[in-house]
Image (cartoon, rainbow, N blue to C red):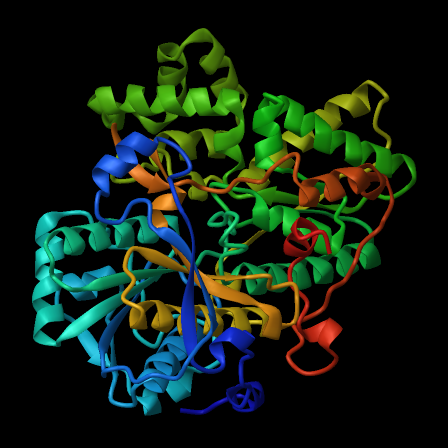
């Protein structure tokens, strides 16, 4: 396999570990825990794994550990640093006993159910240290929620004598890990299940999980490209760039990239929802920034848009819900001539929703009515929100021009940054954080824990001062409606409008809207001064008061 110069140099990087994990460890138990909400229901559903204490690892006495076989699964979308979680886990179990073995299940949780696996030897793991992607064993989105899946998985765990399973994933995957841990505990199968917090979206976090891995690297990759675009638009001075960023359920990525690059406009979905803004109000807000800059002779700028924005606009949410019901109960819709579909929908919707639907550009109206997921819902990620907004801003500006309120020119270009960031080579922060998460998972296993998520905190300090331990997954749970029924799930962390990161952004945005205050972060640096190479995200630094 041919390697780039960076890959070769990067393979030699030794991730930093918290001091407490560098030798023998012992467990310091904290308070008993309870779930963030719906305590009675969660306790009833998880009698064997509810209320366990928080755990912190501290330096301990050297002791002997028996060899153990461990399984690992990469679940859900890719995030930079997954390979380092596996490296840390591998090194951790080998440090406990050199005869311990690690098995990877191929292409996600489906590999466990279908008995597809490979042993991860030192030779294989060494090839993947400090690299991006999940290609060591691949990832998948199979949900582990049925008893027959748990039993099928248990067959192969028994056959390979695997006593612990580590599931590396986001909130849904870790919810599944918790359900599996409870099931195996209830059956006395002797299989521990440990989770690791992954998602570039940054929405898996709480007091014990400071950040999900991959968020740091992905935001730095997007911010580099946004910075490049801002240089370009400041050079040619004739385009407005509408940039959609990944993050369907939360706007953490858009907010972090705004803090790093200082664009003219950044929409935060959570604020739109809190202020009950209409689509027209969002469009007007952007158009005002365009007009204000045009008045100074600046017919260029950048607008950052979170992927899930449409679902956060209350009126759009209502429209989508009515559309979902209308199209689910009218199968004859597919038989209507394409040219007549729009009018047919308008005639069937309530007056309020019909007016909104009629105001949408043709392409977006079609995306809302045609592209459904297997559950019959709109596929929000397919809606080109960046084009929807720029087209509607263009219409509004044309109207203002006639009224003499707008004197400039408006030409838009569109971008969607998503997949570009998911498999990037991890930043030093993510390389270190992920390695420590994997190593921590090995210590949770060695100490007989199950139903815990690996937790590494205080990560804005030097790595030696990081705090490693475990948090019971049930502590993060609440009950939510999924596909028509109430299910226990990990509560998503949305952008807090009273939090330090949003407040820092809100204090600056009016200035950024009018002035050209762009920052150009440049590419991720792997070698050089600490302040350049090891900095955490602005979000984390602000949250920690740094």
Nearer to the camera, 451 or 375: 451
Taking the spot 53% from the left edge, 80% from the top edge, the residue there is 15
Taking the spot 58% from the left edge, 40% from the top edge, the residue there is 495
Q: Is residue 251 left or right of residue 262?
A: left
Taking the spot 31% from the left edge, 65% from the top edge, the residue there is 139
The quarter holding residue 510 reads top right
Nearer to the camera, 244 or 404: 244
Name the spot of residue 269 as percent of width and height, x first: 57, 35
Q: Is residue 100 left or right of residue 285?
A: left
Above or below: residue 85 compared with residue 356 = below
Name the spot of residue 423 as percent of width and height, x first: 47, 68
The quarter holding residue 339 reads top left
Above or below: residue 103 compared with residue 39 = below
Nearer to the camera, 375 or 501: 501
Name the spot of residue 391 as percent of width and height, x first: 62, 34
Residue 340 shows in the view = no
Nearer to the camera, 536 or 427: 536
- For the N terminus, the image quarter is bottom left
For this orientation, the residue located farthest to the front is 61
Above or below: residue 387 compared with residue 73 = above
For this orientation, the residue located farthest to the top is 351
Residue 297 shows in the view = yes
Taking the spot 10% from the left edge, 49% from the top edge, the residue there is 147
The quarter holding residue 451 reads bottom left
- For the C terminus, the image quarter is bottom right
- Label tally: 0
Q: Is residue 397 left or right of residue 440?
A: right
Name the spot of residue 537 as percent of width and height, x first: 65, 59
């Amino acid at each position: 396999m041919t390697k780039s110069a960076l890959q070769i140099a990067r393979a030699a990087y030794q991730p930093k570990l918290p001091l407490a994990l560098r030798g023998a460890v012992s467990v310091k138990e904290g308070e008993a825990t309870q779930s963030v909400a719906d305590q009675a229901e969660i306790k009833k559903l998880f009698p064997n794994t509810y209320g366990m204490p928080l755990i912190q690892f501290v330096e301990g006495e050297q002791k002997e550990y028996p060899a153990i076989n461990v399984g690992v699964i990469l679940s859900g979308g890719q995030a930079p640093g997954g390979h380092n979680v596996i490296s840390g886990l591998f090194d951790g179990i080998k440090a406990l006993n050199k005869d311990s073995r690690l098995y990877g299940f191929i292409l996600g949780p489906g590999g466990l159910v279908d008995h597809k696996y490979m042993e991860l030897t030192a030779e294989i793991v060494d090839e993947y240290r400090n690299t991006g992607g999940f290609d060591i064993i691949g990832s998948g989105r199979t949900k582990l929620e049925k008893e027959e899946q748990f039993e099928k998985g248990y067959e192969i765990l028994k056959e390979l004598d695997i006593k612990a399973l580590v599931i590396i994933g986001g909130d849904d995957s870790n919810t599944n890990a918790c359900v599996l841990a409870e099931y195996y505990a209830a059956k006395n199968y002797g299989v521990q299940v440990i989770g690791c917090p992954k998602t570039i979206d940054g929405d898996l976090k709480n007091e014990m999980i400071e950040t999900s891995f991959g968020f740091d690297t992905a935001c730095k990759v997007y911010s580099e490209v946004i910075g490049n675009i801002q240089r370009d638009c400041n050079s040619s001075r004739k385009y407005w760039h509408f940039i959609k960023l990944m993050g369907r359920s939360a706007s953490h990525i858009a907010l972090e990239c705004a803090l790093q690059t200082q664009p003219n406009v950044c929409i935060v979905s959570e604020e739109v929802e809190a202020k009950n803004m209409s689509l027209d109000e969002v469009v007007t807000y952007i158009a005002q920034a365009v007009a204000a800059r045009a008045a100074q002779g600046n017919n260029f700028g950048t607008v950052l848009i979170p992927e899930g924005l449409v679902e956060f606009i209350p009126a759009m949410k209502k429209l989508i819900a009515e559309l979902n019901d209308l199209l689910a109960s009218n199968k004859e819709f597919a038989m209507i001539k394409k040219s007549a579909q729009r009018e047919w929908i308008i005639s069937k919707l309530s007056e309020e929703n019909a007016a909104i639907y009629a105001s949408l550009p043709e392409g977006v109206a079609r995306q809302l009515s045609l592209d459904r997921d297997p559950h019959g819902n709109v596929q929000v990620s397919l809606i080109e929100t960046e084009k929807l907004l720029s087209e509607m801003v263009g219409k509004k500006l044309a109207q203002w021009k006639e009224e003499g309120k707008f004197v400039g020119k408006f030409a838009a270009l569109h971008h969607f940054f998503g997949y570009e960031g998911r498999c990037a080579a991890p930043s030093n922060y993510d390389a270190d954080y992920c390695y420590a998460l994997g190593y921590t998972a090995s210590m949770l296993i060695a100490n007989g824990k199950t139903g815990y998520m690996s937790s590494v905190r205080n990560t804005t300090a030097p790595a030696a001062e990081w705090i490693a331990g475990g948090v019971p997954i049930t502590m993060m749970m609440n009950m939510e409606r999924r596909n028509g029924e109430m299910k226990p799930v990990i509560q998503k962390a949305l952008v807090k409008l009273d939090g330090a990161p949003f407040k820092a952004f809100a204090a600056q945005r009016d200035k950024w809207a009018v002035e050209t205050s762009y920052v150009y972060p440049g590419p991720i640096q792997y070698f050089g001064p600490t302040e350049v190479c090891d900095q955490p995200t602005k979000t984390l630094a602000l949250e920690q008061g740094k």
